[in-house]
Image (tube, rainbow, N blue to C red):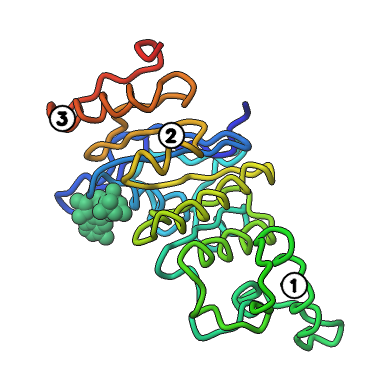
């Protein structure tokens, strides 16, 4: 599998705090990577480097589709096709569904005027296909405030896929969601896989990550403590190793030992 993203030797220090220490991390084409780690492990810092928000410390390298990217910025990352879906900031509550889909990337007609009809029509199509909104009560003009947590994640993921994101990063998308809403959110992550795109799915909960991830990477205090392909380890064996990590502070996961 070709990697679309590679981080080599990436560190990030904030004053005295080494949030990331010499990380090597990659995401394959059409791969869903589950990123697990405790509070403060460095997960969000990793995301911020990938999205161009933080530069890595000198010596760290970022490659996109095999090409080295210097001076990655937020705008550049977006141009490359890297999109983040944040739980809280995913949608503008008071705005309609169609405005949320096209926010910042509005369709215009040839006179440069907003194409309201076009945006409503496209939204309706997305509702019928990717979002799976079948209730007649929801229209492109519905205000998203009333949507459930899982639906909101779905809108954000749909928007990213619609605009051809290649890599969608979800930073704890299931936080605060009920079981059924979490299920919905995971279905949307599967939609990313089906669309042929890649994702990094961050969560504290192994039971959320495991069903949808092709590979799971464990971050522990700024370093990668273990990683393995899902089919190399049962969920029980994984939990066993995570518990050992919690007890000893080290993790003996490697593809070799994970037969
Ligand atoms: N802008 C910053 N300035 C100073 N320290 C920071 C900054 N961002 C992160 N840190 C520190 O870096 C470490 C890693 O933080 P990070 O937010 O990446 O963890 P996380 O794995 O996302 O945790 P959580 O699960 O709580 O979201 C923490 O010790 C944090 O306090
Ligand atoms: Mg975080």
Q: Which residue is mark 3?
A: 249
Determine whether, in the image, residue 251 is placed left or right of residue 215: left
Q: Earlier in the sequence, mark 2 or mark 1?
A: 2
Does the closest atom of ligand 1 sit within 8 Å of the Cβ of label 3?
Answer: no
Look at the picture and state if 40 lies above or below 238: below
Q: Please give the label number shown on residue 199.
A: none
Image marks 2 and 1: residues in contact by CB distance under 8 Å: no
* Residue shown at the point (33%, 44%) measured from the top left: 205
The percent coordinates of residue 216 (x first, y second) are 42, 32
Q: Quadrant of residue 177?
A: bottom left
At a point 49% along the width and 22% down the height, the residue shown is: 231
Q: Are discs 1 and 3 less than 8 Å apart at CB? A: no
Residue for point 62% across, 36% down: 29
Q: Which mark is residue 25?
A: 2
Viewer-nearest of discs 3 and 2: 3
Residues at badges 3 and 2 in contact (C-beta under 8 Å)? no
Residue 90, can we see it?
A: yes
- Which SS class for mark 2? strand
Label 1: how many Cα within 10 Å (few below 14, some 14–19, many 20+): some
**124 sits left or right of 158 in the view:** right
Q: Earlier in the sequence, mark 3 or mark 2?
A: 2
Q: What is the x, y in percent for residue 208?
A: 41, 44
Residue for badge 1: 124
């Amino acid at each position: 599998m070709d990697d679309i993203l590679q981080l080599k030797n990436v560190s990030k220090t904030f004053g005295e705090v080494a949030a990331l220490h010499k990380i090597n991390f990659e995401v394959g084409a059409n791969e869903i990577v589950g990123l697990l780690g405790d509070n403060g492990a460095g997960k969000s810092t990793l995301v911020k480097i990938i999205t161009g928000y933080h530069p890595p410390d000198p010596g760290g390298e970022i490659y996109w589709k095999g090409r080295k990217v210097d001076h990655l910025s937020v705008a550049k990352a977006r141009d490359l096709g890297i999109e983040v879906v944040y739980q809280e900031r995913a949608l503008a509550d008071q705005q309609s569904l169609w405005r949320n889909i096209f926010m910042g990337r509005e369709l215009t007609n040839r006179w440069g005027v907003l194409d309201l009809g076009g945006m409503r029509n496209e939204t309706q199509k997305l509702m019928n296909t990717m979002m799976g909104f079948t209730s007649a009560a929801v229209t492109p003009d519905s205000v998203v405030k009333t949507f459930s947590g899982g639906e909101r994640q779905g809108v954000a993921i749909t928007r990213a896929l619609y605009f051809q994101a290649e890599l969608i990063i979800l930073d704890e998308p299931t936080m605060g969601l009920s079981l059924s809403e979490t299920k919905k959110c995971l279905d949307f992550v599967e939609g990313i896989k089906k669309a042929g795109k890649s994702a990094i799915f961050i969560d504290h909960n192994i039971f959320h990550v495991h069903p949808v991830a092709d590979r799971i990477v464990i971050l522990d205090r700024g370093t990668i403590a273990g990683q393995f392909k899902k089919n190399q380890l049962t969920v029980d064996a994984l939990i066993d190793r995570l518990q050992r990590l919690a007890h000893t502070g080290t993790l003996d996961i490697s593809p070799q030992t994970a037969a």
